Image (tube, helix red, strand yellow):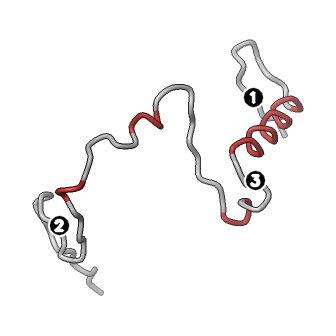
Amino acid sequence: MKKATRHKTNGSEMRAHYDIPWDKAVRGKYARRFRGDWFYVAIDRELMSAFPDADAVNAALHELAAMKPHDASGFLHRKSA
């Protein structure tokens, strides 16, 4: 059985269903949010009710970090099985 062939593009072509208003686009609009000491992760939708905002996530992670052993560098280590 043959694999389905993919359409090859040269990288500069966009498909017609992308309707992006390039005249209103702003380069680096959200770049400032990702600078500094921030670390962004995605959580499962099931957890969103338990962690409604960043403060709830940070509080839970601080509690978890306090329970786990750390080495001198501050990294968490798993217990060996």
Q: Quadrant of residue 15?
A: bottom left
Q: Position of residue 16 (x, y in %)?
A: 18, 76
Question: Which residue shows up at 25% across the image and 52% down it?
Answer: 25
Question: Which residue shows up at 24% across the image and 71% down it?
Answer: 18
Q: Position of residue 59 (x, y in %)?
A: 80, 38
* Residue ranking furthest to the bottom: 1
The answer for how far apart the CA atoms under marks 1 and 3 are is 22 Å
Question: Which residue shows up at 12% across the image and 58% down it?
Answer: 12
Vertical placement of 20 versus 68: above or below? below
Q: Position of residue 14 (x, y in %)?
A: 17, 66
Question: Which residue shows up at 56% across the image and 32% down it?
Answer: 38
Residue nearer the viewer, 51 or 64: 51
Residue nearer the viewer, 46 or 49: 49
Q: Amino acid at mark 1?
A: Leu
Which type of secondary structure does the marked residue at label 2 adopt?
A: loop
The answer for how far apart the CA atoms under marks 2 and 1 are is 44 Å
> Which quadrant of the figure contains the N terminus?
bottom left
Q: Which residue is mark 2?
A: 14
Q: Earlier in the sequence, mark 2 or mark 1?
A: 2
Q: Earlier in the sequence, mark 3 or mark 2?
A: 2
Which type of secondary structure does the marked residue at label 3 adopt?
A: loop
Q: Which residue is mark 3?
A: 51
Residue nearer the viewer, 8 or 59: 59
Q: Which residue is mark 1?
A: 76
Left or right: where 15 falls relative to 31: left
Left or right: where 48 falls relative to 68: left
Residue nearer the viewer, 75 or 4: 75
> Which quadrant of the figure contains the C terminus?
top right
